[in-house]
Amino acid sequence: MTTVTLTVNGQEVSRDIEDRTLLAQFLRDTLRLTGTHVGCDTTQCGACTVLLNGKPVKSCTVLAVSLDGAKVTTIEGLAANGQLHPMQERFRERHALQCGFCTPGMVMAAVGVVERNNGNVTEELVREQLEGNICRCTGYAGIVEAVMDVAEMYRDGKVSQNVPV
Ligand code: FES
Ligand code: FES
């Protein structure tokens, strides 16, 4: 067992865990943050995507003990002051989800796309940079529209803190 200390959604947490514990398991099983989904466990689907120090990672591929001192944001930590994050709002408005299984990871990856490109994205770029996240039921049109909307808001300065840390 190893003690790991992380800041998760703005709160410091410290736990003794087995060295083999994946970040996805740590979030879901240890902290009970079950908004992070596990769809494949083999780095294919992206359902487990969270922000690690502000950047999207697939949490099924990272050992939690390697992250001592890191900051993690999960889907539970994206809304602020009772307000959905603009990406969550736009997903809702654009009907960018159906069953919702891929949605937490898709939203976190989408936030990363906007941030990484300072909002300067094309539809093609959004599709390319979301290719690591698989949705089996909506098709991707609404998802891409939502990201394009938030990117425009970001460029216009209407999204002040795209990535909470
Ligand atoms: S569960 Fe991590 S990529 Fe599918
Ligand atoms: S909304 Fe069902 S898998 Fe994406």
Image: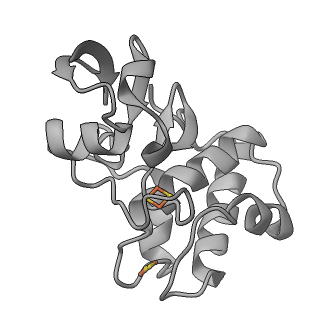
Residue 146 visible? The answer is yes
Q: Give the residue at x 42% y 31%.
A: 63
Residue at position x 56%, y 42% in the image: 56
Q: Where ligand 2 lies, by quadrant?
A: bottom left
Q: Position of residue 32 (x, y in %)?
A: 14, 44
In the image, 117: left or right of 33? right
The structure's colour scheme is one colour
Location of residue 149 in the rendering, given as x and y in whole percent from the top left corner: 65, 63
Q: Position of residue 40 (x, y in %)?
A: 44, 66
Relative to residue 140, is residue 13 drawn left or right?
left
Asked whether, in this view, residue 120 is left or right of residue 145, the answer is: right
* Quadrant in which the C terminus is drawn: top left
Taking 70 as reference, is 100 above or below it?
below
Name the image quarter holding residue 127.
bottom right
Taking 71 as reference, is 41 above or below it? below
Q: Quadrant of the N terminus?
A: top left
Q: Position of residue 113 (x, y in %)?
A: 68, 49
Identity of the residue drawn at 17% across and 19% down: 15
* Relative to 20, residue 66 above or below: above
**Number of numbered discs on residues:** 0
> Which residue does the image show at 32% across and 18% down from the upper left?
6
Please say whether residue 87 is visible from this viewpoint: no
Q: Between 91 and 139, which is closer to the camera in this rendering?
A: 139
